[in-house]
Amino acid sequence: MGFWEEFIPLVLHGAVNTLWVLVISIPASVALAIALGSARVYGNAPIKAIATAFVVTFRGFPLVVTLFLLFFGLADLGIYLTPYQTATLAFVLCGGSYMSEYVRGAIRSIDIGQSLAARALGMTKFQELIYIILPQAIRRALPGLSNEIIYQIKYSSLAFVVGYEEIFAVSKTFISRYFMPLQVFMVDAALYLAMTTAAAYGLRALEYKLRIPGLEMSIR
Amino acid sequence: MGRGSEMVGDEIVLRVENIHKRYKDQEVLKGVTFEVRRGETKVIAGPSGAGKSTLLRCINLLTKPDKGRVWLEGVELTDPETNINKMRQKIGFVFQEFNLFHHLTALENVMIGLTKVKKLPKDVARKKAEEALLTVHITEDLWHKYPAQLSGGQKQRVAIARALAMDPVIILYDEPTSALDPQLVGEVLRVMEELARKGVTGLVVTHEIGFALEVADEILFMYGGRILERGPPREVVFSPKHEVTRKFFENITKLYGGK
Amino acid sequence: MDPVWWEYIPYILQGAIWTFTLVGGGLALGFAIGVPVAMGQKYGPTWLKAVLDAYVWFFRGTPLVVLLFLFYWGVFPVLLGIKLDALTTSIIVLGLRSGAYQSQIFRGALNSVDEGQMLAARALGMTKWQAITNIILPQALRIAIPGWTNEYAIILKDSAICFTLGVIEILTRTRYVVISTGEALGPFLFAGILYIIFTYGGTKVFNIIYEKYHIPGLVGKGV
Ligand SMILES: Nc1ncnc2c1ncn2[C@@H]1O[C@H](COP(=O)(O)OP(=O)(O)OP(=O)(O)O)[C@@H](O)[C@H]1O
Ligand SMILES: [Mg+2]
């Protein structure tokens, strides 16, 4: 078998593995971001402090360090995660923390009148958050969230450091068999570019679909 | 004398007693006491900074008063034991800046309090919301528009419908026409007047003297955090006891061209 | 008996020299690339814009680790026939990639300098080039400082990825310590906290620069 016949199925297998992580980690990151962002605006003092410490930590750690910590560090404590679990969890912790900044900013940018009107109707603080503030804030945060989602697609390549068989991992192993690094890594680049470009278009379409008629929401 | 008066009974629905509020070193409310009877329309007037908005917000506890008590239909709102969210359902509030929920259509804006707060089934809520919208003359073609697609007058009428649909005991209006272009003021005042004539109890902060003279049963004139003078609209506007009151209404009449 | 990990803290800390060589080199090269790219994108001819857009798209859309391997094993030795060491390759790749990001920061800053500034400069008799260098650039560079602060924080954390080529920066050394002591939790936590400290410390420095140079009342919209 030649180089391409061997490499293409292999790298596509890697791509499927990459996607397997992302289909879980992206929605989970967004969910965590909403929870953290809400907690940092609506929570009481201890909740705010915990959420803030969480965000500072996982935004501050390089993603590779988080991956190593979860895989090797937790093992010191007797907690053994599989490469798949490690990668997914690391992306959620890191991505969720970054994204939460956009959610927090968006919540704070909603004018106070929305909150007053909700409370005047008899809504609890929680109802106000769920039914009035978040639906507007998430729309406003969407351009920022989209950016972070695209980052996450690219940074998913780091899952190889804990031995997860994604696109880059299989490529790295492959060049020890066929030393054709230019071709191999250009294929990788093409795959990531395809994923990031497609995601950018998809997310743009989502933003458009969720826009509120007559209201200029998007800041960019 | 206000023409709403034939509907006014003896039953006091809102009692406000000795409300005080201070922000840092500034005492904004210095002991305000009054009551509103069922079916009555009361107008609060007074210069900017007199504490009118603060007073309204102290009534439904959007702002916590430092001292004083508020009762709605005999239930003390200022009692910490009272479930304020439950009581707020009974107090309509109409804001100067409308504060319609940007992400909801006109109909959804009116429905959300019914479905999420009152927990009415969707179809019941929808019917009630439609009724309320028709009452404020928002016709079907506007029901599915978003706030940003409505004119100021339409927005404020939707906001009134949102309050009305909750079957409130009283509606508090905080300068409901001040943010409107002059040509849109009339449609909102007309709706408020119609509601007053139907016997919907209202407490209205406004500078619209025409509305006060035609609709109100009483004017409370606020000055410096107190009710400086009160009485039937004609008396307060045309023969006030205090010089500041006279000056105020003179200027207002000049500005707005009172009827 | 294995040595305990904290005896190696000085060894890990020495990695900061390499980390900051990567960060400083990457940021500087990125600046040298990013500013002309942004100007080309804004003021250049159409063909140049297309070329620059493609550059930005490629370097922003490809993961850093792929770029590092592509250049270290492919572009330099195979395509260009030059052998570069891991540190030099890493700085060049970080710089090329940061240049793509910095051009976006700087383009936003250029766009937020209002059109009136250019018109007024031309009305004084300046050429387009004089107007750009004397009037537009000094304002845009100031407006871009917060964006660069952010870029610093990003490139600092990304520099850790250069461990894959064996640059003996903080993370590589931390891994050596993990391997030789058999302890992972402590060393990796220590490394993580080190990055947080460097992020905040560096951000402080950038904020001081910003305070020093920012023009009262002038804020960028797009940044
Ligand atoms: N949240 C607040 N914090 C500090 N001061 C406040 C706050 N809300 C109101 N005030 C002050 O209280 C005073 C009364 O304000 P209020 O809004 O009640 O007046 P108003 O009679 O409604 O005036 P206007 O006609 O301008 O609406 C003002 O001096 C205002 O600056
Ligand atoms: Mg007011």
Image: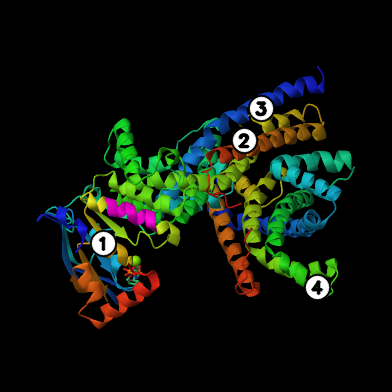
What range is drawn magenta here? B186-194
Residue A16, given in percent of the width and then of the height, sits at: 63, 26
Badge 1 density bin: few <14, some 14–19, many ≥20, Cα 10 Å:
some
Question: In front of the other: label 2 or label 4?
Answer: 4
- The residue at which mark 1 appears reads as B214
What amino acid type should be assigned to the residue bearing mark 1? Answer: Glu
Q: Are marks 1 and 2 on the same chain?
A: no
The residues bearing labels 2 and 4 have C-alpha atoms spaced at a distance of: 45 Å
- The residue at which mark 2 appears reads as A202
What amino acid type should be assigned to the residue bearing mark 2? Answer: Gly
Residue A54, given in percent of the width and then of the height, sits at: 46, 50
- The residue at which mark 4 appears reads as C123
The stretch drawn in magenta includes residue A88:
no
Question: In front of the other: label 2 or label 3?
Answer: 2
Point out the image quarter for the C terminus of chain C.
bottom right
Tell me the residue at 17%/57% (across/down). B5
- The residue at which mark 3 appears reads as A14
Chain letter for mark 1: B
The stretch drawn in magenta includes residue B188:
yes
Badge 3 density bin: few <14, some 14–19, many ≥20, Cα 10 Å:
many
Tell me the residue at 58%/52% (across/down). A219
Q: Quadrant of residue B123?
A: top left
Question: In front of the other: label 3 or label 1?
Answer: 1
Q: Is mark 3 within 8 Å of ligand 1?
A: no
Q: Main secondary structure of the magenta part?
A: helix
Q: Are marks 3 and 4 on the same chain?
A: no
What amino acid type should be assigned to the residue bearing mark 3? Answer: Gly
Q: Is mark 1 within 8 Å of ligand 1?
A: no
Question: In front of the other: label 3 or label 4?
Answer: 4
